[in-house]
């Protein structure tokens, strides 16, 4: 019976940490590349997204030119504007769109 209290405390801490992560808004970034696409350009997009969310999912559609789609969490919407401003001038990128994720 002595294990119940430590177990309950540990469970509460785990649930609390999970809820804090879920509380952050989720965003979707779409990057359409042009014919100048290189693997370095794809990594640049992935690196930029991971600066805001180290656990973000970044998927690259294997067509040519490819399209990258990333889903990430951040505390507010400043990440979208910053990512668009950072990525849009890249010569291998045709368009960038970032918006809150709708469920």
Image: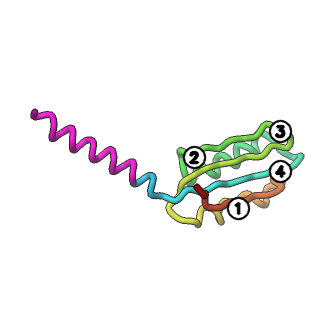
Determine contact: label 2, label 1, CB under 8 Å: no
Q: Which residues are magenta?
A: 1-19
Q: Residue furthest right?
A: 35
Which of 40/16 is in front?
16
Q: Residue furthest front?
A: 103
Magenta stretch: dominant SS? helix
Residue matched to label 3: 63
Q: Check whether the beta carbons of the residues at disc 3 and disc 4 lie within 8 A of each other.
A: no
Direction from residue 17 to residue 55 in the image, left or right: right
The residue sitting at 56% across, 54% down in the picture is: 52
Ranked by sequence position, the earlier of labels 3 and 4 is 3
- Residue 78 x %, y %: 59, 66
Mark 4 vs 2, N-terminal side:
2
Q: Are marks 3 and 1 in contact (CB under 8 Å)?
A: no
Contact, mark 3 vs mark 2 (Cβ under 8 Å): no
Mark 4 highlights which residue? 92
Mark 2 = which residue?
56
Most foreground residue, 92 or 11 = 11
Q: CA distance from mark 4 to mark 2?
A: 22 Å
Crowding around mark 4 (Cα neighbors within 10 Å: few <14, some 14 to 19, many 20+) is some
Res. 4 image quadrant: top left
Q: Is residue 47 left or right of residue 22?
A: right
Q: Earlier in the sequence, mark 2 or mark 1?
A: 2
Residue shown at 45%/53% (left/top)? 22
Q: Which residue is mark 1?
A: 84
Observer-side mark, 4 or 2, equals: 2
The mark that comes first in sequence, 3 or 2, is 2
State how far apart marks 2 and 1 are (Cα).
16 Å
What's the distance in space between the residues labelled 3 and 4, CA to CA?
15 Å
């Amino acid at each position: 019976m002595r294990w119940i209290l430590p177990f309950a405390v540990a469970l509460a801490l785990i649930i609390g940490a999970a809820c804090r992560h879920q509380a952050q808004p989720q965003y979707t970034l779409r990057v359409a590349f042009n014919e100048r696409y290189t693997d370095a350009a794809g990594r640049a997009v992935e690196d930029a997204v991971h600066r805001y969310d180290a656990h973000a999912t970044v998927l690259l559609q294997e067509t040519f030119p490819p399209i990258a789609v990333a889903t990430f969490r951040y505390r507010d919407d400043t990440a979208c504007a910053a990512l668009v401003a950072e990525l849009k001038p890249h010569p291998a990128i045709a368009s960038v769109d970032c918006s809150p994720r709708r469920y």
